[in-house]
Image: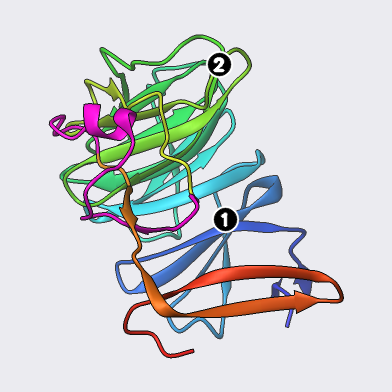
Amino acid sequence: MHADTGGRALPELRDVSWGGGRFVAVGANGAVVHSADGLSWTEASATDEELLRIAWGGNRFVALGRDTIHYSTHGMTWTPASAPATEQQMFDVAWADGRFVAVGNGGAIVYSTEGDRWAAASETATEPDDSLRGVASNGTRFVAVGRSTDGPAPIVFSDDGDTWMAASDTVTPACRTGSLWSPRAKATSSQSRSNENNPAIRSWRARTVTPGSRQASLRSQSTSVTLPTVTGVSS
């Protein structure tokens, strides 16, 4: 079933959130629809501009567009933010610990407790050529990620939304010969060992696998690839 309100098909919906007893979805041309059960939807009006993301927190929704921020306590009537705090295009918004955080182009990071007046982060740990495309929180810490035109992809984190720090420039490789990966295992690379005592860095670490007495082989014509059998796993 496609999104339809009163016979008018909506062009595109980009994001959906739950809060205050209802779902609210946002999308192209400022589309906003809400539903209490996910089955029947009612259209609301917020803006004519494209809306990319929506978040719920502090008893209100915040809808984010590239050049606009709107907020609502119930998803039906929307008000534009009086002080967006940036002229950069924005791409994502999240809520945690009493505040919203939004991120965007130019490494821009802004935050707000009510969704109305926004302040620019005092320290973003980003560069002007960074474009932050996503932000999330575990309830106490925000992490924002994106891309850069001149360097590695930025990963920055903050416990208050105002002061941010850059994560490690080095990302542990996803695969090594004879290794499995575990967040609690001891690191085997020199770079990983150098980060072990840094409490700000949470990375995956390598655990060396001891081959079992049996081996499994994958054969294709004359090619044979031998894989070590992990102890405790039957072949």
Residue at point 16%, 45% (across, down): 140
| Frontmost residue, 90 versus 117 | 90
Could you tell me the amino acid type at mark 1? Val
Q: Label 1 belongs to which residue?
A: 26
| Frontmost residue, 202 versus 112 | 202
Local packing at callout 1 (Cα closer than 10 Å; few below 14, some 14-19, many 20+) is: many
Left or right of residue 1, residue 68 in this image: left
Left or right of residue 8, residue 118 in this image: left
Q: Nearer the viewer, mark 1 or mark 2?
A: 2
Q: Label 2 belongs to which residue?
A: 151
Spot occupied by residue 35 in the image (x, y as percentages of width and height): 48, 75
Indicate which disc, 1 or 2, sits on the residue closer to the N terminus: 1
What is the total number of numbered labels drawn onto the structure image?
A: 2
Spot occupied by residue 149 in the image (x, y as percentages of width and height): 63, 16
Quarter occupied by residue 166: top left
View extreme (bottom): residue: 234
Q: Which residues are magenta?
A: 175-201
Left or right of residue 10, residue 49 in this image: left
Could you tell me the amino acid type at mark 2? Gly
Report if residue 70 is visible in the image: yes
Q: How is the image coloured?
A: rainbow
Which type of secondary structure does the marked residue at label 1 adopt?
strand
Where 233 falls versus 111 (above or below)?
below
Where 82 falls versus 172 (above or below)?
above
Residue at point 48%, 64% (across, down): 24
